[in-house]
Amino acid sequence: MEMRSLYVAQLQRMQCLGHEIVPFEDILCQMMDMIKPASQEYFVVQDFLQPECSQVSGALFDALFNLNKYLQFEQRDPFME
């Protein structure tokens, strides 16, 4: 619930900047797929500290707090990594 309320501010910014609106459910599903938390109900610190998550865990925080960085992450070419 807390993540959703933080994401509302980002949705408003996306609308104001004319970006495609990405529903919270899509963001959450994408983050669950990338981070693979121990529980499907919530994230814990240990989920973000897994070696295989270190490259992408920041994207979750960017989606909630830093729209510009999140949009850069979304627009990257995954085949260039």
Image (cartoon, helix red, strand yellow):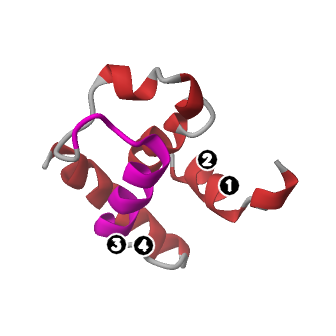
Give the side of residue 56 with respect to residue 79, left or right: left
Residue 72 image label: 1
- Calculate the distance from the C-alpha at mark 2 to the C-alpha at mark 4: 15 Å
- Indicate the secondary structure of the residue bearing disc 4: loop
On screen, 76 above or below 47? Answer: below
Q: Residue at left 27%, top 60%?
A: 8
Residue 69 image label: 2
Q: Which residue type carries mark 1?
A: Gln
Residue 5 image label: none
- Calculate the distance from the C-alpha at mark 2 to the C-alpha at mark 3: 17 Å
Give the side of residue 57 with respect to residue 23, left or right: right
Q: Earlier in the sequence, mark 4 or mark 1?
A: 4
Residue 22 image label: 4
- Indicate the secondary structure of the residue bearing disc 1: helix
Q: Which residues are magenta?
A: 24-39
Q: Residue at left 48%, top 24%?
A: 50
On screen, 74 above or below 60? Answer: below
Q: Residue at left 13%, top 49%?
A: 1
Measuring from the top left, give residue 52's x and y in whole percent: 57, 31
CB under 8 Å between discs 1 and 3: no
CB under 8 Å between discs 2 and 3: no
Give the side of residue 1 with respect to residue 3, left or right: left
Q: Which residue type carries mark 2?
A: Lys
Measuring from the top left, give residue 77's x and y in whole percent: 79, 61
Answer few, some or many: residues within 10 Å of disc 3's Cα (few below 14, many 20 plus, some between 14 and 19): few
CB under 8 Å between discs 1 and 2: yes
Answer few, some or many: residues within 10 Å of disc 4's Cα (few below 14, many 20 plus, some between 14 and 19): few
